Image: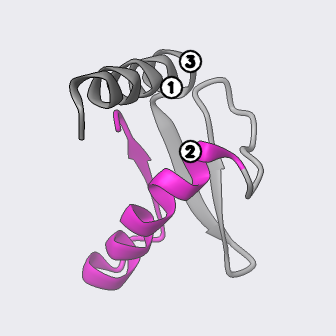
Amino acid sequence: MTKKEFKDWKEKYKYYEEKYYPITWEINDGQIEIHCKDGKLLPLDHDLYSIEASFIQDQIKDYGYYSGEICCI
């Protein structure tokens, strides 16, 4: 990763954290639902959904958690 790519990535994630975090998640009818800090449900095609989905799946698999809160990326 170049310095520019790292800076772009860092700025993008900083923006997401300020706008959406902390996020909450839960399993509803077998589907992961992610809500941003204002309570709005994020659509499945949202960037944050794809960023956090694998982390959430690990929480379910490793710890048996079916809801939670994520404070930052």
- For marks 2 and 1, give the CA distance: 8 Å
Is 2 located above or below residue 45 in the figure? above
Q: Please name the residue that numbered disc 2 is placed on.
A: 48
For numbered disc 1, what is the local secondary structure? Answer: helix
Q: Please name the residue that numbered disc 1 is placed on.
A: 16
Q: Earlier in the sequence, mark 2 or mark 1?
A: 1
Is 21 located above or below residue 26 in the figure? above
Q: Amino acid at mark 2?
A: Leu
Tell me, yes or no, whether the highlighted magenta stretch contains residue 48. yes
44 vs 63, left or right, is right
Most frequent secondary structure within the magenta stretch: helix
Q: Where residue 59 appears, x then y in whole percent?
A: 34, 70
Task: Say which of 30 and 2 sits in front.
Answer: 2
Classify mark 3: residues with Cα within 10 Å, few (<14), some (14-19) or many (20+). few
Q: Please name the residue that numbered disc 3 is placed on.
A: 19
Please give the name of the residue rendered at 24% of the width and 41% of the height, measured from the top-left corner. 1
Q: Amino acid at mark 1?
A: Tyr
Q: Which residues are magenta?
A: 46-73
Classify mark 1: residues with Cα within 10 Å, few (<14), some (14-19) or many (20+). some
For numbered disc 2, what is the local secondary structure? Answer: helix
Q: Amino acid at mark 3?
A: Lys
Label 1 near label 2: C-beta < 8 Å? yes
- For marks 2 and 3, give the CA distance: 11 Å
